[in-house]
Amino acid sequence: MTRPISRRAALAGLGLAAASAGCLGRTENIAGRDPRSQLTLEINTTPADGDPNGIRIARQLEEHLTAVGIDVRLNTVGQTDLWRKVLVNQNFDLYVGQFVETEPFDSDALYGLTHSQFVAEPGWQNPFGITEMAVDDLLERQRRTAGNDRSDAVDALQETVCDLQPFSVVAFPDALTAVQGARFEGWTQDRQPVSVTGLLGLDAVPDADSAGDGGSGGGDATADDDNATSSATAGGADGEGGATLRLVTTDDRITENWNPIAAEYRKYGTFTGLLYDPLVRTDGESTVPWLAADWERPGANTVDVALRDARWHDGEPVTASDVAFTYRFLRDTSLGGVETAVPTPRFRGRSSLVEDERVLDDATVRLTVPDVNETVAARALRVPILPEHVWSERTDPATIGGFEFDFETTQAVVTNNPEPVGSGPLRFVEATAGESVVFERNPDHFLVRPAPDADSETSGGTTDPRAGIPPRYHGKPAFDRLRIEVLPSDISAVESVAEGLADATVSNLGPQSVPRIGRSDDARLVSGRSAAFYHVGYNVRRSPLSNPRFRAVIARLIDKSAVVDEAFEGYAQAAASPLAASPDAVPDSLAWTDGTDPVHPFFDDEGSLDVEAARAALRDIGYRFDSEGRLLSRAQ
């Protein structure tokens, strides 16, 4: 049996070896090789107080990677630091996180997520760094086809992405929200309760027994200005006597940053979505006009958008020039001021559809789009419209203390956007970083403008300012103020709702907090499936994660069924496809039917990890183990 020899011993014997004719070159070849070290991977995720679910997925993966011989470093960081590390700096091996869209989304959402044209850009556009021609071709096909042809393209796209595994879908969670029903009603499982449309769909409970029972502007109770904060917390009234919707969260980002294009500060974009109006919104399975009064496609490559009468929060009118500016700005926040374009780190998949824009008049803009289907064209209209007079002042290179960054970015991308100016149904009031933020109802928003009286002599031919918007949103929101308070954990958030100090939770709830909801007569649990799937993301720019066969083995180390049963305690659905929130969009080849991943099944040994099977799979793709069972890294 050949006895292993250390590199040090080989070097010590170099002189003796050199005495043997013809052996010197061979000795140098052997001694000059660096010994292989154990493969090390870092998993990044947020701590339990930030997200009680993600850390459980990360810990299971850590345990299984360690069992097969990989040195694992589990790194827990705050949400902002996680997304800055992953989305902005792209400095990661693996991460565990959630996708950013909560409502079931169209397959075109995968365009920004996986198309190679975005590989060099920071943000949610292709954070994995995948460059695969087959994926790009299918992404283009699903944009340009319709009907059965598009369905076939979407099926093939899902199968290709699942095969390549730039990210591993783990599970679609139930959106668990603890709510108080005493002051507001309309918390529903039909849509996300704490979403833009969910919050706008709320109604004030008549004769609620709290201060500020009058709903939108009708509260009879008043509070002294000096006592406004305590009244808002305990009684639900703001300093001017109107009803205050009180939400609690563990995520403090909304208390310090209101930049709608800042990827690392936005989770789902709910509250910035209430500050900034898009041209259209999704409402269930429908697309409804919002800031746009109407839109049409006069040609295969153009979309004409007519605007409603609207004003920015500072009183300036919203014009077609603002819309045209927004699309130019999303493509390049420097507006040509630097050598290489600096696109926004959010909304690029949608905004990239608009190739040009032309103002036809103050209220009409023409957008040039490629020849895409109607579904995809509508997605192009779902970006926040920004005021040109504010954001055009933020195109200069970003600086700190007068020094520019050593990479190209702009003030627009890094600003916290203090005193945000949007056109949405809420406007900013005040905030204490890390503690709370307050928004108030926008009294000039088109949702609250009444329709002209048909019998009025002054109505003339004026149309309803809310035309095309579902009636349940007319006159909304049903509160005068929205106050969001930061608490240290999901359990303390639930307790705040149970004790009547808050109306609903915002942040993710772990299953261990659910029983506490039942201890209050007034609090209840609202549960609805979220499309914001949990996933393990891989940095395919780095070896060995650049190898799809290696990623496939890692994917098989994730016991998704156990995650659902043990980590989520059943409040989630395991899946293989990122489109599984819309089951009709998933081909039979990717359907989760028997508790097993249809593409990358878990290395299962009667409910436990089959370590030997996993190691055999790694050997099959060229990896070796040392005598202590450690997986050795290959040449970098």
Image (tube, grey):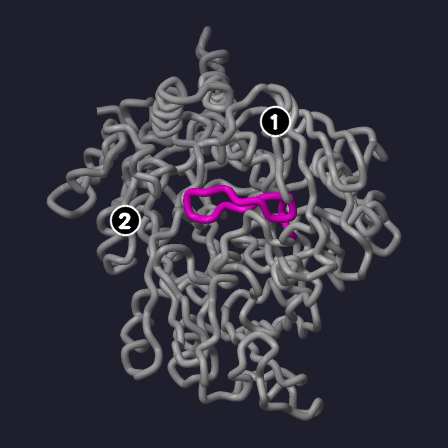
Q: Quadrant of the N terminus?
A: top left
- Please state the horizontal and vertical placement of residue 329, each as a whole percent of the image: 75, 38
Q: Which residues are magenta?
A: 277-292
Viewer-closest of 632 and 114: 114
Is 83 included in the stretch rendered in magenta? no
State whether residue 339 is above or below residue 98: above
Q: Amino acid at mark 1?
A: Arg
Q: Residue furthest right?
A: 402
Q: Residues within 10 Å of mark 1 (few under 14, many from 20)?
A: some
Q: Residues within 10 Å of mark 2 (few under 14, many from 20)?
A: many
* Picture quadrant where residue 510 is located: bottom left
- Is residue 121 visible in the rendered image? The answer is yes
State whether residue 434 is above or below residue 579: below
Viewer-closest of 82 and 391: 391
Left or right of 589: which side holds 198? Answer: right
Q: Secondary structure at mark 2?
A: strand
Per the image, the residue denoted by label 1 is: 297
Q: Secondary structure at mark 1?
A: strand
Residue 573's disc is: 2
Left or right of 276: which side holds 336? Answer: right
State whether residue 17 is above or below residue 506: above
State whether residue 257 is above or below residue 136: below
